[in-house]
Amino acid sequence: MSTTRHLVNRRRRLATAPPRTAGAETEPAPEQVTATATDAEPRAAASTAADLDAATDLDAATDLGGAGSDTAPDAPADAPRDRASRPRVVIPAVLCALTVLLGAFAAWAFASADGLRDEPARQNSALTDIGRTSEVKGRISEAVGAVFSYDYASPARSDRAASTYLTGRAVRQHKDMLADVREQAPKQKLVLTTTVTESGVEFLDGDRARLLIFADQSNTRTGKDEETTYAAAMFAVDAVRRGDTWLIAAIDTFTR
């Protein structure tokens, strides 16, 4: 800035100095000097303003040049490249982790499935063989209704039912359960009727099955004072297949 002021002052001195011509050493008149100085002042001011504008433009250019050399404006341009390159690094790592996890899960699932196939409880075809399940339910429901019904007028019918549908331990268990009914039936003219209301196959494996039975029982005295009592029963039976039929092999009344 001091250089600019020096230039302006020099131009002012030159503008106010009297012009010299060859062979003329006379000084100009005071009026001429005043006029010349007056005319030179606007020119000097204009020149000074132009110099100041040039200096300002130079400083601005210098500032812009210095700012352009800084690395800060380049940072936004580099950021997208960093962000663009980051997924290419992260995604393979994520895929590798998922591959390891899926491999571990597949190994665990295979081992678990193999263990479940080896468990006897998982061989329960009552969950898959609908036809065989329906067959055993129908035959055992029919057998329960026959062996747990008793008519004092035809005791032989109960005996035939027992010999038809019972086997193994169930023969003795049935005789003990109906002992009181057989004893009281002739005196009170008892008629015992058992009807299966619901049954479910708990276990079915080949020729063996276990069922849960729900039944309604009515006990009617047909003597002089006729009276009917009703009761519900729940018990389980073990069944075995003999030929083309199912037999009751054991009776569980849950009274242990």
Image: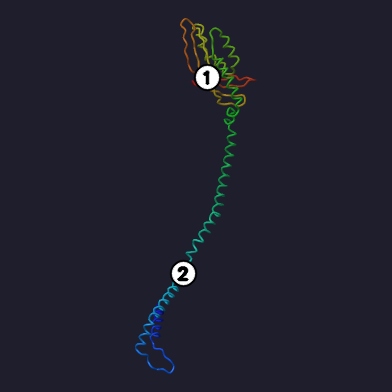
Q: Secondary structure at mark 1?
A: strand
What is the quadrant of the N terminus in the image?
bottom left
Residue with the most extreme right position = 243
Q: Determine whether 202 is above or below 174 in the image.
A: below
Q: Determine whether 101 is above or below 15 in the image.
A: above
Q: In the rendering, at what x and y percent does residue 61 appear?
A: 46, 71
**Front in this rendered view, residue 32 or 41:** 32
| Residue 153: quarter of image | top right
Say which amino acid is labelled 1. Answer: Thr
Q: Determine whether 218 is above or below 76 in the image.
A: above
Q: In the rendering, at what x and y percent does residue 254 appear?
A: 50, 21
Q: In the rendering, at what x and y percent does residue 71 appear?
A: 48, 65
Residue with the most extreme bottom position = 23
Q: Residue at x 58, y 34 (%)?
A: 116
10 Å neighbourhood of mark 1: few (<14), some, or many (≥20)? few
Q: Secondary structure at mark 2?
A: helix
The residue under label 2 is: 64
Q: Is residue 73 left or right of residue 103?
A: left
Residue with the most extreme left position = 30
Q: Nearer the viewer, mark 2 or mark 1?
A: 2
> Counting residues from the N terminus, which is met first, the one under dot 2 or under dot 1?
2
Q: Is residue 107 left or right of residue 76?
A: right
CB atoms of marks 2 and 1 within 8 Å:
no
Q: Residue at x 36, y 90 (%)?
A: 29
Say which amino acid is labelled 2. Answer: Leu
Label of residue 197 in the image: 1
10 Å neighbourhood of mark 2: few (<14), some, or many (≥20)? few
Residue with the most extreme top position = 224
Label of residue 132 in the image: none
As measured in the structure, the alpha-carbon distance from the residue carrying label 2 to the one carrying label 1 is 98 Å
